[in-house]
Image: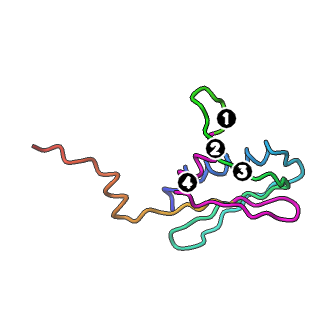
């Protein structure tokens, strides 16, 4: 699970920033749960009913990339649960199988 820490920190930051920007002024909660042996769910609950959306940010835009990052880091495994007094946005991070990690982390053989 240690390999998920950097991505998890970024996701929490993006979701909490979105909650703050959409007017959540009373309370916000962050929770992290291991929902399967290879999946961690990050949840940010806030008092705003505004739903997150992915937008296409231009090269000079100073914002608008957050949910795109969340989408990419979770391979599209995120969602929103509307609630009576706000919403919970969740993002699921999965550990890649050991074989996949070894392949992507091992440099190609440079021998002739």
Q: Are marks 2 and 1 in contact (CB under 8 Å)?
A: yes
Which residue in the structure is indicated by mark 1? Answer: 63
Please provide the residue range marked out in magenta: 65-89
Q: Residue at x 84, y 58 (%)?
A: 86
Say whether disc 4 or disc 3 marks the residue closer to the N-terminus.
Answer: 4
Spot occupied by residue 72 in the image (x, y as percentages of width and height): 53, 51
Density class for disc 2 (Cα within 10 Å; few <14, some 14-19, many ≥20) is: many
Can you name the residue that lies furthest to the top here? 60
- The span from disc 2 to disc 1 (Cα, nearest Å) is 8 Å
Which residue in the structure is indicated by mark 3? Answer: 52
Q: Is residue 19 magenta?
A: no
Secondary-structure class at tag 3: loop
Secondary-structure class at tag 1: loop
Which residue in the structure is indicated by mark 2? Answer: 66
Q: Is residue 81 magenta?
A: yes
- The span from disc 4 to disc 1 (Cα, nearest Å) is 23 Å
Say whether disc 4 or disc 1 marks the residue closer to the N-terminus.
Answer: 4
Q: Is residue 24 left or right of residue 92?
A: right
Q: Which mark is residue 5?
A: 4
């Amino acid at each position: 699970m240690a390999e998920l820490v950097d991505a998890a920190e970024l996701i929490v930051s993006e979701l909490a920033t979105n909650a703050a920007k959409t007017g959540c002024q009373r309370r916000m909660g962050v929770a992290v749960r291991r929902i399967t042996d290879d999946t961690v769910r990050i949840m940010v609950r806030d008092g705003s009913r505004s739903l997150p959306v992915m937008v296409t940010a231009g090269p000079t835009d100073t914002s608008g990339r957050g949910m795109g990052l969340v989408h990419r880091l979770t391979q599209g495994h995120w969602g929103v649960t509307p609630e009576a007094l706000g919403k919970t946005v969740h993002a699921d991070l999965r550990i890649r199988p050991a074989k996949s990690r070894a392949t992507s982390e091992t440099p190609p053989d440079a021998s002739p």
